[in-house]
Amino acid sequence: MQQFDYIIVGQGIAGSLLAYQLIKADKQVLILNDETLPTSSAVAGGIFNPITGKNLDKTWLADTLFPFFKAFSLSLEKETHTSFYHETNLFRPYANEQQRKHFLKLTDEYDLDRYIRLVKPEAYSEIENPLGGLYTSSAGWVDVPVMLEALKQFFLQKATYQPEKFDYQALEISKNSVAYKGFKAAKIVFCEGYYASQNPYFKWLPFNPAKGETLIATIDNYSIKEIVNQGSWIIPLGDQQFRFGSTYIWNQLDWQTTDESKEAISSKIDKFLKLPYQIIDQQAGIRPTTKDRRPFLGNHPAYANVYVFNGLGTKGVSLAPYFAQEMLFFLEKQKDLMPESNIQRFYSLYSL
């Protein structure tokens, strides 16, 4: 029986970055990943943004997360000889005079100078911009499929990756170890994204999954390098291709694209994009969001060597590196997890 320190189930954003950090800490890791399942990571827009929402809310832990996330991403790019981190920043044109006044009031009230500056009208000719808008720095997007493929190749080179549909019935849990088929490990960590809803050990956690759809389009003569966001957003992908998004659907959790979402996104894009475009693809995924919008980290209430790292939701690309390190410290150094992320906050929901 092969011996490991950790078995990681799932090679999405959470599983990949936790496995990577464990391997860099000289731990013997086995990653089991079901390659037959569709995943939200494979179609994620990958936007990161320190200031979000209609009230210009600073992203939770932004001042800590974003410097760590940038340094980690650039280091990983260098090690894997890939390019997936794109700090293109973000422009929000005012939708109307009411929103302009609201945003200006918020920028006066809150200390946002580190991230936001005002943009004059008509700064961009390709979009409707009669009132100007807000420019947010430290924003951008991660090409998640490129990052995950680079990490998969890293894992294959280390002989730590195996395509495998996990069979929960085959997991044997003892006091000091777990066994799965021909493998044995001190600990197992489930990083299954949306599919945690089918995991008998963690399906009691209060996930609030949301389906999202995006469009891939071509636009001729569009030169804006920033992400533009006004109800829907445009991400420049390169080669005259762009991603439009996104929808949030809670009552139809499947992986099928719909005409309704295509129309919903297009109608919002049409309000501010002046140039014609052609839609060439449409994608759907299910985000592993949580009811309190905080991640799920920690160990099972009844099995001390069974863990979860999940619930990163819409901010997964910026949350994952930092919280993978927090999970590493928790697993290896017995460092306490912050209460906002520790699943102990939901232990009362668990019953044998």
Image: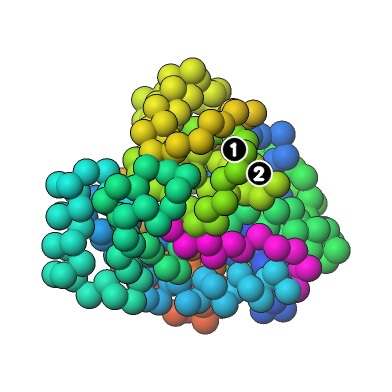
In the foreground, 281 or 344: 281
**Amino acid beneath label 2:** Gln
* Dot placed on the residue nearer the N-terminal end, 2 or 1: 1
Residue 22 x %, y %: 65, 71
Drawn side of residue 260 relative to residue 166, left or right: left
Q: Tell me, for residue 219, which label it has, or none.
A: 1
Magenta residues, start to end: 79-92
Q: Decide: few, some or many residues near mark 1? Use Cα within 10 Å; few <14, some 14-19, many ≥20.
A: some
Q: Is residue 302 magenta?
A: no
The answer to whether mark 2 and mark 1 are in CB contact below 8 A is yes
Q: Residue at x 45, y 48 (%)?
A: 125
Quarter holding residue 8: bottom right
> What is the quadrant of the C terminus in the image?
top left
Identify the residue under disc 2. 240
Quarter holding residue 80: bottom right
Q: Residue at x 53, y 61 (%)?
A: 88
Q: Is residue 81 magenta?
A: yes
Residue 198 x %, y %: 51, 36
